[in-house]
Amino acid sequence: MEKFSNLKSIPSYLSLQNIDTDMIIPKQFLKTIKRTGLGKSLFYEMRYDEKGKIIENFILNKEPYNKSKILLAGKNFGCGSSREHAPWALLDFGVKCVISSSFADIFYNNCFKNGILPIKINEQIVLELADYSHRKEEVEIDLGDQEIKFGNKIEKFEIDPFKKKCLMEGLDDIALSMEKISQIDKFEKEIKINRPWLLNND
C-alpha cells in the first residue's frame, strides 16, 4: 500500500447526503477481485447516461475536478452494503482523501485498509472547503500534523493513532501480518516441539 503523508489538490464537492456504496460503485462492477480498473465506473450512474455517454456537467467529469485527489461529501458517506470495491474505485480514480461530517463505519474502516484517508470534520468546515472547490483553489492535507490547510486557515482533525501509523507507513492487513512473521515462525517451531500432536494430520 502506498504511503500517505501530505496531499495537495483542488477538491471536488458532492453535496449529496447518504451517498451509499452502490452509488459509489454499482453492483454490476463487483465481479472482479482486482483493485484496479474500477475508477472508470466510479459514480457510474451519475457520470454516465443510459447509453453510457459521459454526462459532461457532472463534477468528476469536468476539469480540474476529474483529477481531484480530495473529495468533499455530504454526511453519512459510504452507507449501504459493506463492499470493499467502493474504496478501490475511489483510489483507482485518484481520490486519496474523503472529507465529510460523518461516514458509515464499515466504509470508514475500509478506507484505511486501502490507503485512503477519511476525515471526519464539522459540517461547517466542509462547506468552507467547498468554497475552495468552487474557486478551484488547492487544499492541503498534512496527515503528520493532522491538519487541513486552506487559505490562511488551519483546521485540525482527529484520527486513531494506529490507523494513522498504517497510512503513513503504507501498512495494509497483509503488511501488518508480515511485520510479525518472526513471531509467527517462532510460534510454529514451539508448537512442533511442545505440541506435535496438533500438527498430526492422521
Image (cartoon, rainbow, N blue to C red):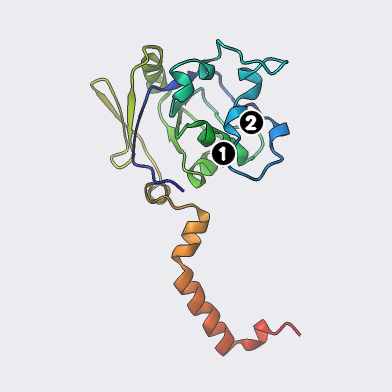
Query: Is residue 138 found left or right of 189 in the rendered image?
Result: left
Residue 56 occupies quadrant: top right
- Residue 141's x, y, as percent? 34, 32
- Residue linked to disc 2: 25
Q: Report the amino acid beneath label 2.
A: Ile
For image coordinates 38% across by 20% down, the residue present is: 129
At label 1, the amino acid type is Trp
Please give the name of the residue rendered at 53% of the width and 83% of the height, measured from the top-left corner.
189
Look at the picture and state if 148 lies above or below 181.
above
Residue 50 as seen in the image, left or right of residue 104: right
Q: Which residue bears the numbered disc 1?
A: 88
Q: Residues within 10 Å of mark 2 (few under 14, many from 20)?
A: many
Circle on res. 137: none
Q: Nearer the viewer, residue 175 or 196?
A: 175
* Residue 1 position within the rendered picture, expressed as x and y whole percent measured from the top left: 46, 48
Across and down, in percent, residue 137 comes to 34, 17
Identify which residue is drawn at 51% across, 44% down. 114
Mark 1–mark 2 contact, CB under 8 Å? yes
115 w.r.t. 196: above or below: above
